[in-house]
Structure formats: C-alpha cells, structure tokens
C-alpha cells in the first residue's frame, strides 16, 4: 500500500523546475512532526531550503484544510507589522502530489512548544510574552481593505457564523454522542454577545507554538499556521491564548494551569488581556467567558475532526490523533465552566 504521508518527489521536482523561480532539484523532504491538520515538510535542494505545506490526502470536509487561503493571507501581510514567511508558489493542481500545496520561505528561528519555555530565563520569557501580545494587537489593527482582504470573510455576526460552521463540522465527524458537547452548543447559541462592530483579520489558532522567534532574542519572525484565519472578531484570538493557558502543562495540554507564573516572569491572564487592550486603545472586555467558551467548543470540534480522520486513515499523525478523541468531552466541560464565569 502506498504511504499517503510521503511526497511524490519526482512529480514535485518536475513541477517546481517549471514553475518556481530559482529552483534547482533534486529535492529531499522531511515531514515536520508537529501539526495535525495540513502536513508540512522541509524541502531541501542543493542551493535552497523551502517549506511545503499541503492539504492531506483523502476525502476532506468542505472548506477544511484550505491551503489556498493560507497562502493568500500570508502573501497579503508581507509588508505589514505582522511577521510572516515569504510566500513563493501556490499549486492548486491535485495531479502533482495528490492535493493542493504551497511553497514558502524556510524561516530560521525557534518555536516554543509550551508557554513555560523550560530552560529560558525570566527576562526572555517576559519578552516573548510581550512580543506575542504586541503581534496579536498589530494583527487586529491590520487594515483589511488596504491589504486586499476585505472579502476574506463574509459579513454578519462572526460568532453566529462560526458556531454554525463548527457545529456542522462537528456533526459531520461525530463518532458517538457526547452530552457535554450538545449542551455547550445549545448554550453558546443563546449566549452570543451583542455585535460591537469590530471586524478584523483573525488568525483562528493564535498560540505560542504557532509563532517563531529569533534564535537569540524575543522578536517574533513569523506567525505560522493560518488555516483557520478569516475576517471576524478579534476577541476570539485573544481568548484562544487564554484558553490554552487554562490547560495543564505538558505535551498534550501545553498550558499553564497550576504553574507559578510570577516565579517564571509570566503575566496573569488578566495582565495579558489588559496589555492587549492598552495596545489597541480598548477600555476593557465584557462577557469574556463567552469568548473563552467559544474557543473550547471550537477546539473540541477540531479534535473530533482529527480523531475522525485517524479512524479514516487520513490523519497527519495517526497514533497521536487517536488519543485526541478522548479530549473532546474534556474541552466541552471546560467550555461550559467558562460560560459560568
């Protein structure tokens, strides 16, 4: 049986030779271990190193794994205050390697897989978190009309749209009835705050392990993994950061629950939120529990999709994906607790 995780390097070499400026093969590819949604590879050639990001093979949910959108938004942000890799080539022809893909610059920096940043001094930790806050605020201040992204998301209430979308995708990948998810979906639908008119670019999965920093400093050199980006409400991104921190530390949770943040030079949830509001000139945020609950719900839906792909044989990391199914009710319970805040 053909390994679906491998690239057809012969076909890829032929295509890139004809379409990518400066390309000289033959290529070698190594799949990055992290990332569950769109498989990502380091692509090495004699003169250059690139990154290739593709849709996974197999039957996919409609609108999921949109590498075309990832390419578009990062290309649009090239001259903005939001650091992104340089986009080099988009291929929408499934015949080349079996699915659409794009080629981008290979950044050289460091990625912190956990917010505790083990082995890093407190001054650096504080600087990294402040830079993470700065980039998020700058992202939400991008003039979407000026960068050509005014049509990157439909009009209307972002949370109504997102709850409907993720409920539909959750139902499409549902493998068993989870009472907590059913309760959370109903509760979110009736708790949406009044639209405050904010309509910005949102990343959709903003967290420390989707950022790359200088090897010897705290400057962010790249925001990665734009698959869930759209035009929406900025508080969804901010609450996504806080959501991760409420999870336990370690490989699966990658959070800060129970961690003495002050001893590590890290801000509290409230301090991070206040710094963000200061940067954007906001007086504060009402109904934050809703935004937090929304993120727990969406992450539960994403995990369910990863688990379903594992059952179908299409997961990027099948063994780890199998484990994710057990986390769906856990995230749903967190979401219900957040609504009560």
Image (spheres, rainbow, N blue to C red):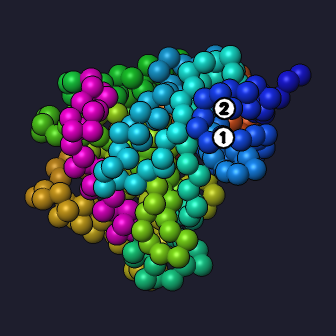
Element type at marker 2?
helix
Residue plotted at (49% across, 65% down): 213
Q: Position of residue 315 (x, y in %)?
A: 68, 32
Residue 155 in sight here: yes
Q: Describe residue 55's horizontal placement relative to residue 31 as left or right.
A: left
Q: Residues within 10 Å of mark 1 (few under 14, many from 20)?
A: some
Q: Which residue is mark 1?
A: 23
Residue plotted at (21% across, 42% down): 143
Check if residue 162 falls in the magenta segment. Answer: no
Residue 335 in sight here: no
Q: Are marks 2 and 1 in contact (CB under 8 Å)?
A: yes
Residue plotted at (71% across, 41% down): 24
Q: Position of residue 1 (x, y in %)?
A: 89, 22
Q: Position of residue 171 (x, y in %)?
A: 50, 19
Corner quadrant of residue 9: top right
Q: Which of the marked residues, 2 or 1, is nearer the chain's N terminus?
A: 2
Please determine whether, in this image, residue 57 is positioned above or below residue 122.
above
Check if residue 137 falls in the magenta segment. Answer: yes
| Residue 16 numbered tag | 2
Q: Position of residue 40 (x, y in %)?
A: 64, 41
Name the one closer to the observer, 222 or 45.
Answer: 45
- Rounded to the nearest angstrom, the CA distance separating label 2 from label 1 is 7 Å
Please determine whether, in this image, residue 207 is positioned above or below residue 146.
below
Residue plotted at (27% across, 25% down): 151
| Residue 180 numbered tag | none
Corner quadrant of residue 321: top right
């Amino acid at each position: 049986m053909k390994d679906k995780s491998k690239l057809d390097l012969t076909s890829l070499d032929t295509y890139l030779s004809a379409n990518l400026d400066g390309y000289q093969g033959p290529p070698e590819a190594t799949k990055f271990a992290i990332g569950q949604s769109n498989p990502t590879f380091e692509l090495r050639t004699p003169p250059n190193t690139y990154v290739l990001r593709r849709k996974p093979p197999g039957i996919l949910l409609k609108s999921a794994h949109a590498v075309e959108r990832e390419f578009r938004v990062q290309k649009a942000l090239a001259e903005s205050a939001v650091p992104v890799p340089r986009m080099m080539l988009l291929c929408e022809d499934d015949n080349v390697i079996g699915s659409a893909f794009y080629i981008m610059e290979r950044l050289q920096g460091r990625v912190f897989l956990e917010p505790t940043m083990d082995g890093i001094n407190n001054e650096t930790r504080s600087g990294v978190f402040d830079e993470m806050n700065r980039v998020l605020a700058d992202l939400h201040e991008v003039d979407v009309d000026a960068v050509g992204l005014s049509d990157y998301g439909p009009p209307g209430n972002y949370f109504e749209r997102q709850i409907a979308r993720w409920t539909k995708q959750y139902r499409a990948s549902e493998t068993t009835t989870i009472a907590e998810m059913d309760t959370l979906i109903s509760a979110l639908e009736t708790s949406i705050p009044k639209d405050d008119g904010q309509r910005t670019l949102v990343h959709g999965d903003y967290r420390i392990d989707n950022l790359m920093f200088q090897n010897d400093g705290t400057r962010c050199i790249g925001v990665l993994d734009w698959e869930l980006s759209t035009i929406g409400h900025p508080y969804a991104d901010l609450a996504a950061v806080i959501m991760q921190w409420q999870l336990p530390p370690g490989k699966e949770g990658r959070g800060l629950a129970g961690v003495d943040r002050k001893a590590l030079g890290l801000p509290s949830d409230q301090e991070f939120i206040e710094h963000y509001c200061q940067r954007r000139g906001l007086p504060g945020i009402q109904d934050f529990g809703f935004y937090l609950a929304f993120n727990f719900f969406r992450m539960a839906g994403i995990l369910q999709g990863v688990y379903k792909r594992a059952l179908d044989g299409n997961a990027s990391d099948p063994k780890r994906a199998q484990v994710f199914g057990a986390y769906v009710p856990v995230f749903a319970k967190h979401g219900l607790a957040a609504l009560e805040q």
